[in-house]
Image: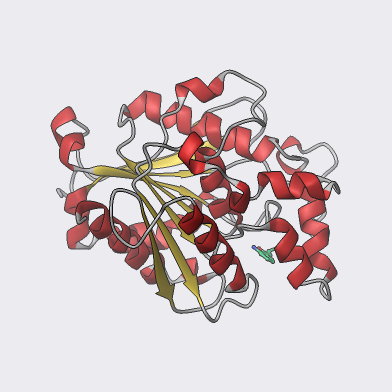
Amino acid sequence: MNPDWLQQKTDVRYAPHSALNTYQVCLPRPPSPESLEKRLWIIYIHGGAWCDPDQDATTFNPAQEVLLQSQNIEQIAGFASINYRLAPHSIKIPDPDDPSRHAVHPDHIQDVLAALAHVQQTYLFGERYILVGHSCGATLAFQVAMDRQWRATNLSNKIVSPLAILAIEGIYDLPALVEHNREIPYYRTFVTSAFRSDEAVWRSVSPTSADLNASWPTGKLVVIAHSRDDELVEWQQADLILQSLQGQNFHDSGARKARVLELSGTHDLWRGGVEVARAVEFTLKELTSS
Ligand SMILES: Nc1ccccc1C(=O)C[C@H](N)C(=O)O
C-alpha cells in the first residue's frame, strides 16, 4: 500500500430517503481490474439493535485503521461501511419529522441492499467481497444472502452476493433472543420497534430460517465470531446459527465452510478495533485456504 495515495470518502449518498442513506469508502490504492483479481472488498454493516443513533458506519473505523497498518492490507482492494435508516429508539426519542429514525422492516434491509448495489456498480467487484456485520448488522448481512422476499423493488437482480459472510456478536434468531432475555423488556421493545409485533415475521426474517442452498449457492464461507463475554447477545445465538448452517451442509472444511472464531471482549468490542480486524484477517485466511 502507498500511504500517500490512500483515498477516503464519507457521506456517499445511495438513496434520497434520509440523512442516513449514505456509505463511506476507503481505498488503500488506485482501483484496477488487476487489483481486484487478487484482492477482496470488505463491506461493513454496523450494529445497534436497528435503532441506536449512536452507532453508525464510523464504528468500523477502529478496525479499518488496524487493517490499514497490517500485512493483510495486501489482500484488500477497498473498504465500505454502510449507514441505513433506524427504527425509533425507545429512550433516545427521535424528532417526529426525522425520516432517518422511523424505519420499520423491510426498510433496514432494503437500505442495505440499495447501498450494496451502489458500491458494486461503482467499484465493480462482483462477488469478490466479504460482507461483515456486527450485532443486528450480522442479521442484515445474512438477510442479503437469504431469499429476498421482503424486497419491494427489482433491486435483487442488481446485487451479487458475497463470497463470505463474517458475522460478529450477531443476532440470528429473534424469537430465541427475546425469549432468552424475557426478564429484560428492552429486547422485545427493540425487536418490535424494528419488526412490529408479529412473531411469525420475527421468525421468517431470522437467519436461522434461511435456506442458503437455494438463496446463496455461491457462498463459500461463513465465520461466526462471538465472545463468551458478550453481555448483550448470548452465545446461544451463535450455537443456533451454527446448527442451522450445519443442517445446510456448511462444514469445518470443504466447498462450503462454517467456522467459529472466539473473540474476547464485551458486545461493543468494535471500539478497540483489534478484535474486528482479527476476525477479518481470519476470514481472509479461511477464504484462501481450503
Ligand atoms: N445490539 C444490542 C443487542 C441486544 C441488546 C442491546 C443492543 C444494543 O445495541 C443496545 C444499544 N446500545 C441501544 O442503545 O439500543
- In the image, residue 176 lies at what x, y percent? 71, 64
Seen from the viewer's position, the closer of residues 270 and 151 is 151
Outermost residue toward the bottom?
229
Q: Position of 237 compared to 250: left or right?
A: right
Which quadrant is home to the C terminus? bottom left
Q: Is residue 107 above or below residue 259?
A: above
Residue 91 seen:
no
Tally of numbered tags? 0
Q: In this view, does 204 lie above or below 278?
A: above
Q: Position of 163 compared to 5: left or right?
A: right
Which residue is rendered at x = 57% and y = 42% of the image? 143
- In the image, residue 44 lies at what x, y percent? 45, 49
- In the image, residue 186 lies at what x, y percent? 81, 66
Which residue is rendered at x = 67% and y = 23% of the image? 152
Q: In this view, does 46 lie above or below 201?
A: below
Seen from the viewer's position, the closer of residues 82 and 182 is 182
- Report the coloring of the rendering: secondary structure
Outermost residue toward the top?
154
Q: Position of 182 compared to 255: left or right?
A: right
Which residue is rendered at x = 65% and y = 50% of the image? 206
Task: Specify the quarter for ligand 1.
Answer: bottom right
